Amino acid sequence: MHQTPQSPPIRVALVEDDVNFQNALMEAIQEAPDMALQGVADTRARGLQMLKQMPIDVLLVDLGLPDGSGIDVIRAAHTLQPGCNIMVSTTFGDETHVMQSLEAGAAGYLLKDSEPQRMVQEIRSMHAGGSPISPLIARKILTRFLDDGARAATPEAQPTPSKTRAALSQREREVLEFITKGFTSDEIAGLIEVSRHTVLTFVRRIYAKLEVNSRAEAIFEARNQGLLGD
């Protein structure tokens, strides 16, 4: 199937040092008719350099790189290419790595137990505005969310927010307010006069800063932190 002018290929880049996994993923991406492999880096340093050289729509990042943490690459991508969708692909499934990645700007988190073709499907999902999360990781996030809610509901809980208030920009606060009122991404785009893609980028940033993965969680956490008006 040929690409139409309205559907340019998804520009994908990898930061991955596992040669076997890297090669399998590269092959799957190159065979996908709707994707273009922009670049591949096998170290933190090369990943940071790659971000300065080419536009990227979806970036897949491994966390355990030979010269440092992939979280540094996530932070740099979030700053240098704010429209880039960042997905972690790693063997690290602990809560610390998960939360650090989301806080740094990742909007997806997959463990390396997925087949390359499944990864390609998740790349499409992320580019369309989704936030692919491995079931095990989703369970950990949900468990933390429920635990935090239970602690907040206990009589001993303090009325003040239990966590540092998320540093949302004025535009992110505006989008968050619209989310709480039930507006869709398309409706928000029309209200603030930006593209739907830009709205989805704001939503991913909000989720990352609030450490959540859904609208319901975002609303709960925003209220918990006192970010919303009455």
Image (tube, helix red, strand yellow):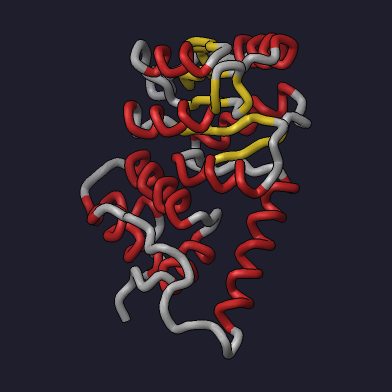
- Along the viewing direction, whichever of 225 and 110 lies nearer the viewer: 225
- Which image quarter is the C terminus in? bottom left
Q: Position of residue 133 (x, y in %)?
A: 64, 43
Q: Is residue 218 left or right of residue 154?
A: left
Please report the residue visible at 32 percent of the width from the left and 55 percent of the height from the top. 168
Going 65% across and 69% down the picture, which residue do you hit? Answer: 147
Q: Is residue 229 above or below residue 8?
A: below
- Please identify the quadrant where the N terminus is shown: top right
Residue shown at 50% from the left, 39% from the top? 106
Of residues 161 and 149, the one drawn nearer to the viewer in this rendering: 161
175 horizontally vs 192: left or right: right
Q: Nearer the viewer, residue 121 or 162?
A: 162
**Is residue 1 something one can see in this rendering?**
no
Q: Is residue 107 visible?
A: yes
Give percent across and percent down for residue 72: 46, 29
Q: Position of residue 15 (x, y in %)?
A: 55, 18
Q: Position of residue 205 (x, y in %)?
A: 40, 47
Answer above or below: position of 162 versus 218: below
Disc tally is: 0
Which picture quadrant has residue 6? top left
In the foreground, 41 or 10: 41
